[in-house]
Amino acid sequence: MNEWGPVSWVMMIPIVGIIGGITVAVVATITRGRIRELEIRERIAMIEKGLVPPPEVDPRGFERVMDRYDRIRRTSDAFRTGSVSSGRHRRAGIVLMGIGLGLLVLISFAGEAPEQGVGVGGFIMVIGMAFFLNSLFEARDDAARPSQAATITPAPHTPQPPGPESTTPK
């Protein structure tokens, strides 16, 4: 018969460790899924009883989600009003001017061709300056626009006619 020697036992240690690690990961995933399912059932039961469930078990997670929602809403509102584009043009202009200046220096000194460096880098810097100036004009346009805040006026209160329960004799 073939006996297990010390080398065989040493080789079994990583194999058992890997199998054990995979088993622990699978059991943890199944357990988390069951706990989440029970949390969902608890929330459904609370809603069916007319209670208001807590927003989230993890308050920081709830705050992160709400912050993300607020950011998305602000961004979509800004796109509708046009105020985001000025900031984007400003950033694009600054980045392009930086790239143009970098190419100007790189081509002029490393390539020993100052005329070509000024030509290429200067061209990109002019495009960046155009973006930057565009952002300044858009910022003025945004300030000149009237705010689009909706004013809600309450509807006048109209008395309701008496219901059938008030007309029945007692």
Image (cartoon, rainbow, N blue to C red):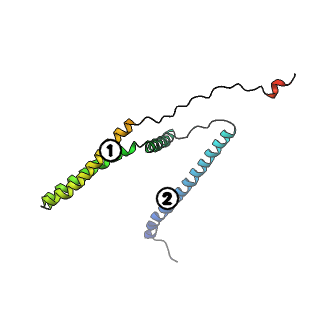
Pick the front one: 138 or 5: 138
Q: Mark 1, mark 2: which one is toward the viewer?
A: 1
Q: Residues within 10 Å of mark 2 (few under 14, many from 20)?
A: few
Residue at x 63% of width, y 36% of height: 52
| Residue that protrudes farthest toward the top in the picture | 170
Q: Which residue is mark 2?
A: 21
Q: Can I make out residue 165 in this image?
A: yes
Location of residue 144 with respect to 114 vertically, above or below: above
Q: Quadrant of residue 159?
A: top right
> What's the amino acid at mark 1?
Ser
User: Which element carries disc 2, helix, strand or loop?
Assistant: helix
Pick the front one: 108 or 59: 108
Pick the front one: 17 or 99: 99
On the image, the x and y values in percent for residue 19 come to: 51, 62
Q: Can I make out residue 106 in this image?
A: no
On the image, the x and y values in percent for residue 31 come to: 58, 51
Left or right of 111: which side holds 45? right
Q: Are marks 1 and 2 in contact (CB under 8 Å)?
A: no
Left or right of 152: which side holds 167? right
> What's the amino acid at mark 2?
Gly
Q: Which residue is mark 1?
A: 135
Task: Quadrant for the C terminus, please.
Answer: top right
